[in-house]
Image (cartoon, rainbow, N blue to C red):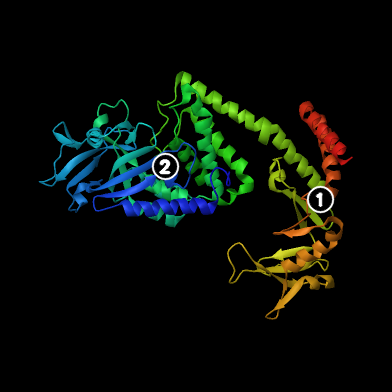
Amino acid sequence: MCQNIVGSETHVNSMRLMHTVKDNVSSNTKVTVITSGSFGEGLELRGSDLDVMYVTKSIEVFEDFKTAYTTVYLCLEMETDDVKPGFTQLLIEQIHTQFPCKHCEEHNGKHYFSGTSFKQEIMENTDTIVHGPCVSDKEGKWDQAMCLHCRTWISQASQWITRSNNSWPSYSVKQSIIKHGVLFVPIGVKGSPKEDIEWRISFSVGEKFLINTFTHTQLICYALLKILLKDVIATYAECENLLCSYFLKTIIFWVSEELPQSIWKPENLIHCFMRCFSRLIYSVDYSICLHYFIPENNMFEDKIQGHAHRETKTKSLALYRFMCFNIVGIENHVKTLRLMNTVRDVMTNNNHYTTITSGSFGEGFELKGSDLDMMSEAKFIEVDTDGIKPRLNPNLIYLRTETDDLKPGFTQMVVELTDNQSLLQFCEKLNGKLYLSRTLFKKGFLGNTMNIYGSKIHGPSISDKDGIKFFAYIIFFHSKSYKILGIALQLLGESESDRHAFKRSVKIDADKR
């Protein structure tokens, strides 16, 4: 994905910077230019068009005009009574005498700014078409949207400020989004009697801020969802115009708010993608996709119904089944794999170490190219955070954490008490204190395995040169644990699962020979 589709993290950042520079150069005293869509997010996906927003500086929108003080030509006030959440009408409150208001429409004695008329003027004498809130070329290569700006955050989205208790988005990112305010694009609620004078509230700038905070794994998940939409779902005529990339962006925003940032790592890509994909299926199934900033706006309301609803759901479920049977495995297979690893961990435990299978295998994935990650927790070492815990066992090595002047998430290990003289070879003395050296600690284990397995240090781990041989002794337990698991499942009456476990055992034994 990084090399062939999305690009590396550096490439994505360069793309974003290039468009930011281009926007700044293109902006002038009349308009602010903002590149949005895939290009603005740093993605160059096949078939993407260029989306550009032009924010006019001669018109300003206020939620409450009574608090306004401005010298712009035209002042508009939001009027949201009897309008669907996420939309508004723009009431003309103040107009400069020289400003031609040819986009006004009168309703019940009030004058409103017409988005439809606004777009039509832009299209005059051009070979363009209307595409939602945008004006587009007939080849579909670019979309241009003329926008209006409100400098303050609006009450419809006020609950977003305090909603998320997770680490994403951060407080500073939220403040940057709030400080910018919101935009308005010329499109109303389809079928509304006042559709021509309704405007959609746009959070495009805030959404760019959010996407710029994504880890590269989050960005790849987002790109995968876009590819899924374009190359799978939208290829069916019944589904072509039902879903759009904005719905996918909304889904990944919600999932990002729910999951801890630490989960978005390359080794968890499939898990994270399936979480987003499952949410998409749920949204289609129940016709619910809540706007990220204004949840009262269900963007799927009256959107996916009847035959189209069934077709979209069918295609999504078909892809879900393909992922299950060919890549991730069905739910029972994943649970069986997790249980098998738990059985093996218990079998390999002894008086000195507790074994924990981590990484993809520990999570229940058997992905092509995954190595086997094992953690050995030393039982003869006890770590204390405050140094006041009683040290009653003479056979244990007692360490204390020390985090002064260290980056969060890291610590030094001070040796508090030990009768184990062999430990001293792994220690370093600093300022009168004895510290356990992680470098010497790993080298000590490396020396025991290097000659036999050609092992090497790999980050916090010790790995064999092939990613297999160092853990060759595990293979015996790998096969045996499947046999034990098969017996356990047989006793529980899980005939299909126990048959699968025994088959895995036979295959592993055959591979050993």
What is the secondary structure assignment of the residue under circle 2? helix
Going from the N terminus, do you reach mark 1 or mark 2 first? 2
Quarter containing the N terminus: top right
Amino acid marked by disc 1: Phe
Residue at image mark 1: 471
User: Quadrant of residue 116 in the image?
Assistant: top left
> Going by the image, does 414 lie left or right of 506?
left
Q: Looking at the image, which residue is at 46% across and 51% down?
A: 15
> Going by the image, does 139 lie left or right of 434?
left
In the image, residue 350 lies at what x, y percent? Answer: 84, 54
Given residues 340 and 34, the one toward you in this image is 34
User: As displayed, is residue 222 above or below residue 388?
Assistant: above
Q: Looking at the rendered structure, which numbered label has been put on residue 353?
A: none
Pointers 1 and 2 in contact (C-beta within 8 Å): no
Q: Residue furthest top?
A: 307
Q: Looking at the image, which residue is at 18% across and 41% down?
A: 92
Given residues 394 and 169, the one toward you in this image is 169
Q: Looking at the image, which residue is at 50% across and 23% down?
A: 236
In the image, residue 190 lies at what x, y percent? Answer: 32, 27
Q: Categorize mark 1 by other alpha carbons within 10 Å: few (<14), some (14-19), many (20+).
A: some
Residue at image mark 2: 37
Given residues 313 and 452, the one toward you in this image is 452
Q: Residue furthest bottom?
A: 432
Let me know if residue 154 appears in the view.
Answer: no
Given residues 105 and 137, the one toward you in this image is 137
**Number of the front mark, 1 or 2:** 2
User: As displayed, is residue 471 above or below residue 134?
Assistant: below
> Going by the image, does 29 lie left or right of 351?
left
Amino acid marked by disc 2: Gly
In the image, residue 446 lies at what x, y percent? Answer: 80, 62
In the image, residue 296 lies at what x, y percent? Answer: 38, 36
**Circle count:** 2
